[in-house]
Image: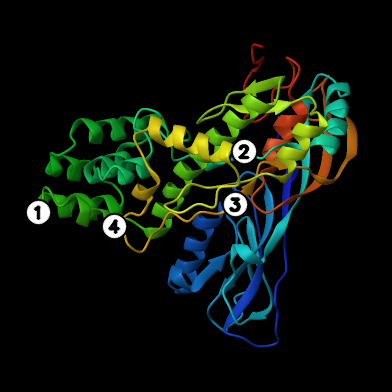
Amino acid sequence: MIKAVPEDFIVQEKADLPLRQKGKYRVYLLTKSHWNTLDLIHQLSRSLGLPPEKFSYGGKKDKHGLTYQFIAVAAPGDFSQEGKNFSLTSQGFMDRPMGPDLIQGNSFTITMRSLAGLDLLERNIEEARRSGFANFFDDQRFRSYDPERGFFAEKILRRHWNGALQVYFTSAGPNSGKSERHRKTALYENWRDWPACLSQAQDPLEKRVFGYLSDHPKAFARALHLLPQEEISMLYAAFQSYLWNEILRRILKLKVEDLAEVDGMAGSYFFWSGLDEVVFSYLAGLEIPTPAARMNLPDELVSSFYQDVLAERSLRPGLFRTKVLRKIYFRSFKRRALVIPEDLSIIDRGEDELHPDKKKMSISFFLPRGAYGTMLVKRITFGGKHAHIWDLHDVRRKPP
């Protein structure tokens, strides 16, 4: 397992910041645990009396771990402080907001616990240094996904505005409790009975949207404009990531003979034990764009797979040019198919003090922006029945 305690999963953002003595934006180092980035920014927004639009960041960090990242606030005052499970420390100023383009990558220090042995991990670490791992978007990207309801963004692409609203308000995430799941089910069963949905509403957004629909029963497109743009952008990204993962899955099944398969929240992840020189060269140089109306496709193989994947879902690139939410876009960016971790090393190994008769191992490494440390953990722990970690399901071999 990983993330038994926050210090078991440490992430330090590395950024190239054009810091100045003065500027419109004050830059802070945000240290946190038990908070995700957006929730903490909203908390800071309320406590400081600043609108959320004043805050900018380069990447979202999960709440499960100890994380260090940079944020910027469009206000000159120094809001450095310490709060419950976070601290904010001024670093200087910039003339621009914080953004992903300033991030170089992330350094990780991860402790894996409750291990039956360490030999398997040591062999896999050595292989990961040589041939890397498949750069899938990991399960964290798909926490908004409900297999029964589907993807919000796919409904948008199909111009199914009512369906998109239904997905948004009736989907239950993996961390939803029993009572919340029952409430979401009640909303689903009463969908289009807007007064009944309004009676089930709890947060201000639900009350605002269902109140609006009670007065305008079929104004689905206008109701979509009441949803937070930040959340819609994340929901768009989740579907783009799902499609991107599917492209990579098909490439790997074609190119790599021996794959191990690990179940995920929105599809399987594939890992190899080794790559021949030709396949490694192709994957190491391959950058696959995320889907959008316009994509710069690297070769005919990727183009063919994109055509197949979209056609199977009755989609086409032009549909990504949405009109109902004009301020939010499906933006395409290139993502590496294969990542080789830098400076991957074992920094500690031995008895696990939290689990008697078990072992632990701590590793450190650097990954470029956008790559998931948990994917590397999956890579180095697959291959044995005792290699069960935080979000790693049973491993099975792909049939030949």
Q: Residue at x 70, y 72 (%)?
A: 17
Instruction: State the residue in front, 226 or 292.
Output: 292
Viewer-proximal residue, 136 or 52?
Answer: 136
* Figure quadrant of the N terminus: top right
Answer with mark 1 or mark 2, whichever residue precedes in sequence: 2
Residue at mark 3 to residue at mark 1: CA–CA distance: 44 Å
Dot 4 falls on a residue whose secondary structure is loop
Q: Which kind of residue does numbered mark 1 sit on?
A: Asp
Q: Nearer the viewer, mark 2 or mark 3?
A: 3
Extreme residue in the bottom direction: 22
Amino acid type shown at disc 3: Lys
Label 4, label 1: how far apart the Cα atoms are: 24 Å
Q: Which residue is mark 3?
A: 334
Residue 363 vertical placement versus 296 (above, below): above
Q: Earlier in the sequence, mark 3 or mark 1?
A: 1
Q: CA distance from mark 4 to mark 3?
A: 24 Å
Q: Is residue 374 above or below residue 12?
A: above
| Mark 2 touches mark 4? (CB < 8 Å) | no
Marks 2 and 3 sit apart, C-alpha to C-alpha, by 13 Å
Q: Residues within 10 Å of mark 1 (few under 14, many from 20)?
A: few
- Place of residue 202 in the rendered image (x, y in percent of width and height, measured from the top left): 28, 47
Look at mark 2 in the image and give the residue it sits on.
136
- For mark 4, what is the residue? 323
Label 1 – label 2 distance at C-alpha: 44 Å
| Residue 356 quadrant | top right
